[in-house]
Image: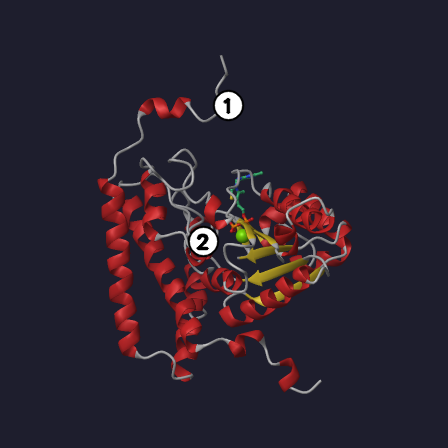
Amino acid sequence: MTTNAVASASSRLSEETLLEMFWTMLLSRRLDERSWALHRQGKIHFHISGMGHEAAQVGTAFALNRGIDYVHPYYRDLALVLALGVTPTDFMMSLYAKQGEYSSNARQMPAHFGYKPLNIVSGSSPVATQVPQAAGIAFAIKYRQTCGMVDPADAAQPRVALTCLGEGSTSQGEWHEGMNWAGVHKLPFICLVQNNIYAISVPIESQMAVANVADRAAAYGVQGVVVDGNDVLAVYDVMSEAVARAYNGEGATLVEAKTYRPVPHSSDDDDRSYRTREEVEAWKKKDPIMRFRRLLEEMGVLTQAIIDDYEVRARAAVDKAQAEAEAAPYPAPEDALGAVYAPVEE
Ligand SMILES: Cc1ncc(C[n+]2csc(CCOP(=O)(O)OP(=O)(O)O)c2C)c(N)n1
Ligand SMILES: [Mg+2]
């Protein structure tokens, strides 16, 4: 094939889309930073961060048919869900656990993202439980497309189910079960492993005896791909191929995005106990937002004036989200007793 014939999907992105990707990554980072500050001020009880993972997540979201495909995220997926349509106010409402919170009326923990209108499926706290659930959704997609008993328009709609987790969580049995199911049934399924080399304090070498999570794909009969998770366009390219594979009935893909978490695991972790400051500082030179910024500047797509404008708008969006969440009431205490069991019909 000639070079032209293999032109990457990202080379066809418009300047407008490239800027939208950058904006989403920046907004996610600013929202994330504010969330840490709110926790340290004692205003919210918990935050778990997506910092450092923005390229892996935004590159993924932009390769999907957003609102049509199903996404079963994990707790680090703030940039992913923002790209899918969750708003900063939605997120702040969950941090503050306020009445009317978008996913569960404040019953779910923050960062357990779920939003039915956007096909975002909320997960449970035990890690990797989302994998067999997402493989089940992929099975349902394929069943609807092939069983001939459903709405023909729905059956004709190409769809994929995507789920995310960290590399440490691939040690859980659920991951293997979900991957195996996806391979056996050749499902329209993508598993994105965001490999930040730690599971809280446990480094990757204590977690697995192979170099890459994606090396295990062969054991399930699915395609395995390793990608630089700090390069948003590289992620977009491999994800675009994985989505095309799913849409074309060619089966599942395991994408491993290599990245880093430059902050503690959560607001309740102190990472100084298990890694050096030098390691964290070295990572900052690979920050995915700085990297994308440099690329877009070189391409002449991004200017200082645009960045200044984005910073002002991101700050305004985060301020507004915080103000709206602070002003909202808490749910009534008796709300905690409802929405667990179906009402008993007298
Ligand atoms: C089954 C289970 N065991 C332990 C935990 C506690 N826990 C929450 S997140 C986490 C680390 C997961 O690490 P990784 O999968 O690498 O994802 P990362 O947080 O690094 O993105 C652990 C051990 C849990 N939630 N569920
Ligand atoms: Mg990890």
Q: Is residue 182 visible?
A: yes
- In the image, 5 versus 155, the foreground residue is 155
- In the image, 128 versus 116, the foreground residue is 116
User: Where is residue 306 shown, x and y percent of the image?
Assistant: 30, 75
Q: Which residue is mark 1?
A: 342
User: Where is residue 84 shown, x and y percent of the image?
Assistant: 46, 56
- In the image, 152 versus 309, the foreground residue is 152
Give the residue displayed 65% in from the left and 83% down from the top. 5
Q: Is mark 2 within 8 Å of ligand 1?
A: no
Q: Is residue 63 above or below residue 204?
A: below
Figure quadrant of residue 292? bottom left
Q: Nearer the viewer, mark 1 or mark 2?
A: 1
Question: Which amino acid type is shown beneath numbered disc 1?
Answer: Ala
Instruction: Specify few, some or many for label 1: CA neighbours under 10 Å numbering under 14, 14-19, or 20 or more.
Output: few
Q: Quadrant of the N terminus?
A: bottom right
Instruction: Specify few, some or many for label 2: CA neighbours under 10 Å numbering under 14, 14-19, or 20 or more.
Output: many
Q: Which residue is mark 2?
A: 81
